Amino acid sequence: MSDVYRTVVVTGATSGIGKAIVLALRQRGFTVYAVGRNEDVLKELSETSGAIPIKADVRDTQRIAEALNGIEVDILINNAGILSTRASFHEIDPDEIDAMVDVNLKAPMRLTRAVVPGMVERRRGHLIFIGSIAGRAAFPNSSAYGASKAGLSLFCDNLRLDLLGTSVRVSEIVPGRVETSLYRTSIPDGQANAVLYDGYRSIQPENIARVVENIIDLPIFVDVSRVEVYPTDQAAGGGTMVKFQQ
Ligand SMILES: NC(=O)c1ccc[n+]([C@@H]2O[C@H](COP(=O)([O-])OP(=O)(O)OC[C@H]3O[C@@H](n4cnc5c(N)ncnc54)[C@H](OP(=O)(O)O)[C@@H]3O)[C@@H](O)[C@H]2O)c1
């Protein structure tokens, strides 16, 4: 448990990084509200870890805010995200643009808007965002996802300015490849393991949970504003060139 913070809200708590964060923070004695859609996993999480479930789509900010009414949220971890498609921009279903911007960018902004006034009033709070290296560098077939994450990243920078002097911290964690279910919709037929994970040493969700614990634990006059976490075997950059074809 931290000396300063007690109560944490984690979105996307039913899988991957979010679930690992819930388990790690519950072990530390935090009161954790786990926001997710999957009722069975929420129930299991609550039974095994004591996390308090909030069943909601992350886009339904009003419902989440109502569930948190009267609760002093110290830490909000905006983790829920989707990579609903992985294809060239000129080939994606236009609805995928809305889906990724709504879940990855608008929902965290709106949920932050719901909890941050209380943090400012109490002069106590930590807003943590799970971004992506796809929001910091260009990757093929990631235009809409990358734009949503880049928007989130700049939102964090702007928020830090608006919150100066309030003692509320804003941290963006920017992971490279983590072994989770994120690609289940964008790489069909259960091929995600074969394409992305088999034979690669990817980050594990627990590693990101450890980063979260570490940045929470620092003295509150220290804000890890952004931390990029790559697998040792992954790097971004370089130019891509193709041969001209008539
Ligand atoms: N895995 C990576 O390589 C990687 C790299 C960089 C950044 N990230 C980011 O890490 C975050 C966590 O993803 P993950 O890798 O742990 O993937 P994951 O295993 O697929 O977990 C994503 C979580 O978000 C939830 N979610 C998605 N849409 C939602 C909605 N509309 N309402 C409520 N919950 C919703 C999912 O719940 P459901 O099961 O109900 O859909 C799930 O619990 C995301 O923001 C992702 O962009 C991941």
Image (cartoon, grey):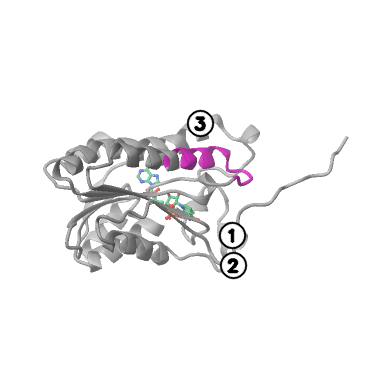
State the residue in front, 93 or 236: 236
Callout 3 touching callout 2 (CB < 8 Å): no
Q: Which residue is mark 1?
A: 196
First reached walking from the N terminus: tag 3 or tag 2: 3
**SS class, disc 3:** helix
The amino acid type, in three-letter code, at marker 3 is: Asp
Q: Which residue is mark 3?
A: 95
Q: Which residues are magenta?
A: 138-152
Alpha carbon separation for disc pair 1 and 3: 25 Å
Q: Is residue 153 above or below residue 211?
A: above
Helix, strand or loop under label 2: loop
Marks 3 and 2, Cα distance to the nearest angstrom?
Answer: 32 Å
Prevailing secondary structure of the magenta residues: helix
* Label 1 within 8 A of ligand 1 by Cβ: yes
Q: CA distance from mark 2 to mark 1?
A: 7 Å
Q: Where's the N terminus, which quadrant? A: bottom left
Name the residue that disc number 2 marks: 200
Element class at badge 1: helix
Comparing labels 3 and 2, the label whose residue is closer to the camera: 2
Indicate the position of residue 235 as horizontal and vertical percent values.
60, 59
